[in-house]
Amino acid sequence: MNEKLKYNIEKDVKDLTPLSNSLDQNLKMVTDELGTEPDIMIRPLHLFNNAKAALLYIAGMTEANMVNLLVLSMLSEQSSGSVGGNGENVFQTVLYRSLAIGGVQKLKSIDEVLLAMLEGNTVILIDGFSEAIAAYTCGVERRAVEEPSTQTVVRGPKEGFTEAVHTNTSLIRNKIKSTNLRMEYRIIGHQTRTTVVVVYMKGIAEEKVVEEVRRRLDVIDTDSILESGYIEEFIQDKTFTPFPLLQNSERPDAVAAGLLEGQVAIIVDGTPFVLLAPVTFVKFFQSSEDYYQRYDIATFLRFIRFGSFFVSMLLPSLYIAITTFHQEMLPTQLLISIAAQREGVPFPALIEAMIMELTFEILREAGIRMPRVIGPAISIVGALVLGQSAVQAGLISAAMVIVVSFTAIASFVIPAVNMGTAARLIRFALMILAGTFGVFGIMAGLMLLLTHLSALRSFGIPYLTPISPLVPGNLKDVFIRVPWWAMKKRPKLDKKEHTTRQGKTSSYTEKAADDSRKGGEVK
């Protein structure tokens, strides 16, 4: 526990109940609130000068060796006989001399005592004093740092965030060793008391964006925060949209890169997914690996991702529109082939596509929910057996199976899962428009979609930045990724002052690259 955390506890809890001078009275208040459950441990002690005390902690949430160290350290102080004065200095002696542990804090209210215990700390109560001592002994079992499961890369760091908030903050500090890195702690949720950390780079992040993040977090009034998705829905701009307005990542390098570009990170205890705000549309098509390999390869992959996004949205609807209303758009041989396949199909193209898309969504969900051992088997059975059987039975045309399969594969190319989900939802709306109005319905839907995207904001930042409004300097990292030596300015989300990220070193690197291409030598 630290002073920042203590301040937010006091600000969050109304009508704090002060501690009593009586040890028995304090213990009664603790047991009245927490009960006498078997995991509520109360260890009586007799300290020097005949002072009565008690150690309070919750079994399973503390590190047993650290608790034992606390007891031994206080008893060894007693046996050494080095304590002078009367019993009035017992509290100060324990606080400043006896405890062989780093994280120590004074508590003045029963509310702080309860919260400290629920966080896994050990509380020391001494008879005759209306203050308590909290020692950091948190030992909750946590998952170790592992490779991210949703954002894998071929080249790049293999470490990912965990469910422990302090582990996640340390992973970010390990990436950014700067005094400008700021972390602000908050406690949100009346029942869960979840720790939320706001992280930003002072001088790089726009101050009004940071202030807006603080304001939206402070007005959250709820019982529970169990995952960062709770926070995301509370603080995102209140707009009904299928598009994500906050970015989430379980990669420390991706979050560090976002911080260095002016974004604000929100870490929630209990989840490996960290939120980033504000965010723009193009951010969801950028991968960490883009910056770890050659710029020409990264640019090619960017085009693949944008193309896959449009394929995921439009391919089924275009097939429906052309085969239903605009057959003249197809070459004669292709038209004859498709007509021959559909000759025995009893459903119109729209119903056929809906059946296949819904079937694939069911298979996708089943593959995720099924045990990992048999999940792939379900996917193979669904893709091969059901698809082939449907074609042979004359219920579905072979061309429709190809269209739906390629659409599904294209949806997995998008790095951000939530953006891929948005494309899946839009796909169904465009299919209905295509089946009703043909290509004209698709164009009308795309115009409405573009209008909607232009109106979206993420913490006041236009969602289509830097395309609309056009910011020419930021186009170096949108559809293409220029070489690192050419990206001297960080993307401007707003009118921030500190936009330069490369100075003399970059100039030297650029000159070296030019001389190397000319076959010269760097002076």
Image (cartoon, grey):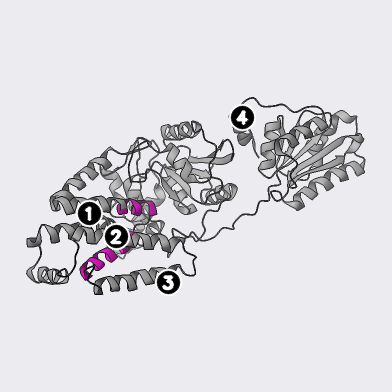
Q: Amino acid at mark 4?
A: Val
- Residue that mark 3 sits on: 377
Q: Tell me how far mark 2 sits from mark 1, CA to CA.
A: 10 Å
State which mark lies toward you, 3 or 4.
Answer: 3
Q: Earlier in the sequence, mark 4 or mark 2?
A: 4
Q: Tell me how far mark 2 sits from mark 3, CA to CA.
A: 20 Å
Please identify the quarter of the rendering in which residue 287 is found. Answer: bottom left
Identify the element where label 4 is drawn: loop
Q: Earlier in the sequence, mark 1 or mark 4?
A: 4
Q: Tell me how far mark 4 sits from mark 2, CA to CA.
A: 50 Å
Q: Tell me how far mark 3 sits from mark 1, CA to CA.
A: 30 Å
**Could you classify mark 3 by the number of other residues whose Cα lies within 10 Å: few (under 14), some (14-19), or many (20 or more)?**
few
Q: Position of residue 95 (x, y in %)?
A: 78, 36
State which mark lies toward you, 4 or 2.
Answer: 2
Identify the element where label 1 is drawn: helix
Q: Amino acid at mark 2?
A: Glu
Image: magenta residue range: 397-424
Q: Position of residue 447 (x, y in %)?
A: 19, 44
Q: Earlier in the sequence, mark 2 or mark 3?
A: 2
Q: Position of residue 157 (x, y in %)?
A: 48, 60
Q: Amino acid at mark 3?
A: Ala
- Residue that mark 1 sits on: 431
- Residue that mark 2 sits on: 357
- Residue that mark 4 sits on: 13
Please identify the quarter of the rendering in which residue 356 is found. Answer: bottom left
